[in-house]
Image: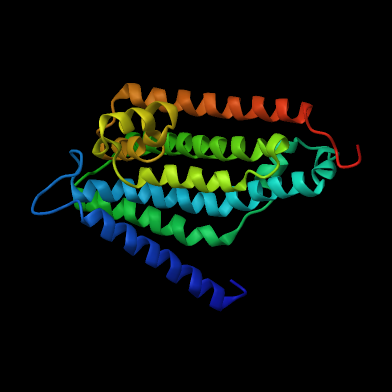
Amino acid sequence: MEYQFNLVIEILAVGATLAGSLFTLSLFFGHGQQLGGWSWDAALVVLGMHTFLEGFASTLLRPNLGNLVKQVQNGSLDFVLLKPIDSQLWLSLRTISPWGLPEIGVGLGLVLVGLARSGAHPGLTTWIVASAMLLSAVTILYSLWFVLAATSIWFVKVWNATEVLRSLLAAGRYPVSAYPPVLRFLFTTLLPVAFLTTVPAQALLGLAPGRMVLLSGAIAAICLVGSRALWLQALRHYTSASS
């Protein structure tokens, strides 16, 4: 916040992005219409979840995993591997950018507004379950980003692939049930977009089946273990800048 004008510009950019998302979402709702069985107010919770995760990505994932790609390119990854700390942990958490904080705040605000307007009154148990599912969503999102960044050891320039990933994950701003059956299958199995936004929103609204809660945790664990295994395999193929 030392650079006030940049802060104002960032807040305006977040506001413009949110306004665009709300406008696009409103196009699907007419006189009492629903989107894939979701009301306007319930869909706001999904959009809030997506906005929160975008803020998380801007705060932690982009600055850190973007640096990983650059470190592979210029050879400075050598110095990371020499540090007496786990390299994946250091590469994932070293930098925290404040530019995603407005999105995190706006996302949480949208979730609360959607809950209030939809008449949902989640109890303590519901909040705990929804928080656990949101943690699973954060873990899945981190794992997908880290896997892409780790492949830079083989392919060097992969940062453009993250833009493709962002475009695919943008589908999470709408309830997954609004998509055709083929895309619903894709966003539930091959690319778990549903478990990033729709399923945590269902949990808060009291609509998530118990099996989905367990499945969300299992997918998060598989993604995290998979990203770790891929990183260890990538390090075996890494040749330092001096070799």
Question: Residue sitting at 24 percent across and 33 percent down?
Answer: 207
Relative to the observer, which residue lies in front, 206 or 225? 225
In the rendered image, residue 206, in percent from the top left (x then y), is placed at 25, 35
- Residue at (67%, 53%) from the top-left corner? 95
Q: Position of residue 220 (x, y in %)?
A: 49, 29
Question: In the displayed structure, would residue 140 be above or below residue 102?
Answer: above
**Percent of width and height locating residue 138:** 49, 40
Q: Identify the image quadrant of the N terminus.
A: bottom right
Q: What residue do we see at 9% from left, 50% from top? A: 32
In this rendering, would 58 be left or right of 78?
left
- Residue reaching furthest bottom? 5
Above or below 6: residue 33: above
Is residue 108 shown above or below 223? below
Q: Is residue 201 found left or right of 26 in the rendered image?
A: right
Residue 187: name its quadrant: top left
For residue 3, what is the image quadrant? bottom right
Q: Nearer the viewer, residue 28 or 57?
A: 28
Residue at point 39%, 66% (across, down)? 15
Residue found at the far right of this picture: 242
